[in-house]
Image (cartoon, rainbow, N blue to C red):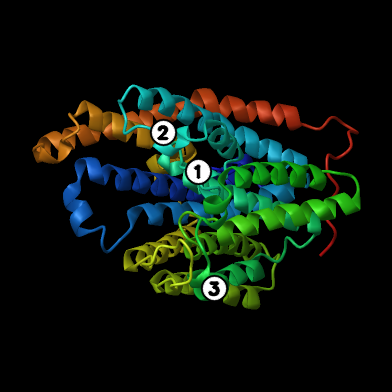
Amino acid sequence: MPTNTLPSVQTKIGSPAERASRMGWLDALRGLAALVVVFEHSLDVLLPEVRRTASPWFDFGRYGVFVFFLVSGYVVPFSLQRRGNVRHFWAGRFFRLYPAWAVSLGLALPLGAAGVTYGLPAALGDRPWASALAHLTMLQDLLGVPNAVNVLWTLSYEMVFYLLITAMFVAGVHRSSARVALGFGVGAAILGVALPSGLLASRWPGGTILAAALLLAGGLAAMLSGRRAARRAGVGLVAALALTLVLFNSRIGAIESLCIIATMFAGTAVRAIQEGRLPRRPAMAMVAVVPVLSIVAGMRTPTSWALYANPNPLGRDWSIAVAAAWLTFLAGLALRHRRMPRFLVWSGLVSYSVYLLHPLVVQVVWYAAGQDTWGLPVPVRAAWGAVLVAGVLVSAALTHRYVERPAQRLGRRLTARRPGAPAAAPQPARP
């Protein structure tokens, strides 16, 4: 994610300038994460020396996306709680995620067809309608469908997280984030090694996609209902769908999938502890265990009976990257009252577009440079690197300015409640 999927932070007190300063450290973290992911995906094109020497010890891509996951966990659930309205929350998510997502897909398809990029995964053409439906749910990486743009896989985990926090909110247990984070962390370290990968997609590919789409639509509709029984049924449907996909149908494996969800809920718990919503000492103890469990899980080898699972552990490069992401997030939290570098803050504002568009820019540069960039002299590769960075930042700035911001304004206008209008969804029960 990673992704710039964060709404603006609002507080009950303080001026707009104060609220912006509070958001600055989060923007800086997002900007840093996005730039590191760009660096990771440029290695195979322009920096093979770094790939050979540093990558076996440090996974730059996983470092970036885990920083994104922590920041999303820190902010997004409180957007739902601040709104107090499930329908408004999901409308906001729609206008936040889908417009830039559509731009990236709209560019990937013709560029791939023209041979300017690496091309689309061949498996997308086997069941085009099913692949399109899976992408529309944003759960494609958990439904056995190759990602049309490789970075879209993280959005599947963002979507699972949104489903789980919505179910917890409607059920009135949204203050259990620390316990939930610990539970997923324990599951990753203990159960993850024995769980299958892609089990449902390998047995019932088309049926899994259709069933997931129907359960997703039905579960969200039920949670928006005015009837308590329907809301409870919706909570059950959504939670069952999210957990089933993460536990049994993950492409990347249950170990990493569970670590991702644990990390996002840990970010939520950090925010709740900071604002006094959770008892400080027990919640801090539970959150502190999550990165330790994740690192341990990353070093474990899946069992021989874990169907379709990668037989190798995630590795030390993955575990080191996750540890570094946690340290980066905590450093940003500790320095949140300091002024952040303006370039990083700006990069954070456009980081969602950076994240979605940079793979296409990298591949266009690869094509323009002759597709054999490893043989180019270092100064020439450096020049192409400058072109790559400029292309990523300019395309992201344009998409943010002319697609993301207008879409968000439209979403706010559509969800603005008229005076006296009834709430779209009931308030959650008091925990």
2 or 3: mark nearer the eye:
3
Does 10 appear above or below 251? above
Q: Amino acid at mark 3?
A: Leu
Question: Which residue is the site of mark 2?
Answer: 357
Sequence-first disc among 2 and 1: 1
Q: Residue at x 47, y 62 (%)?
A: 256
Left or right of residue 87, residue 249 in this image: left
Q: Amino acid at mark 2?
A: Leu
Image coords of residue 313 (percent x, y): 38, 68
3 or 1: mark nearer the eye:
1
Q: Residue furthest front?
A: 203
Left or right of residue 27, residue 406 in this image: right
Image coords of residue 201 (percent x, y): 54, 50
Q: Nearer the viewer, residue 369 or 136?
A: 136
Left or right of residue 334, residue 266 in this image: right
Q: Residue at x 54, y 63 (%)?
A: 258
Q: Quadrant of residue 346?
A: top left
Mark 1, Cα crowd under 10 Å, few <14 / some 14-19 / many 20+, is: many
Does 96 appear above or below 295? above
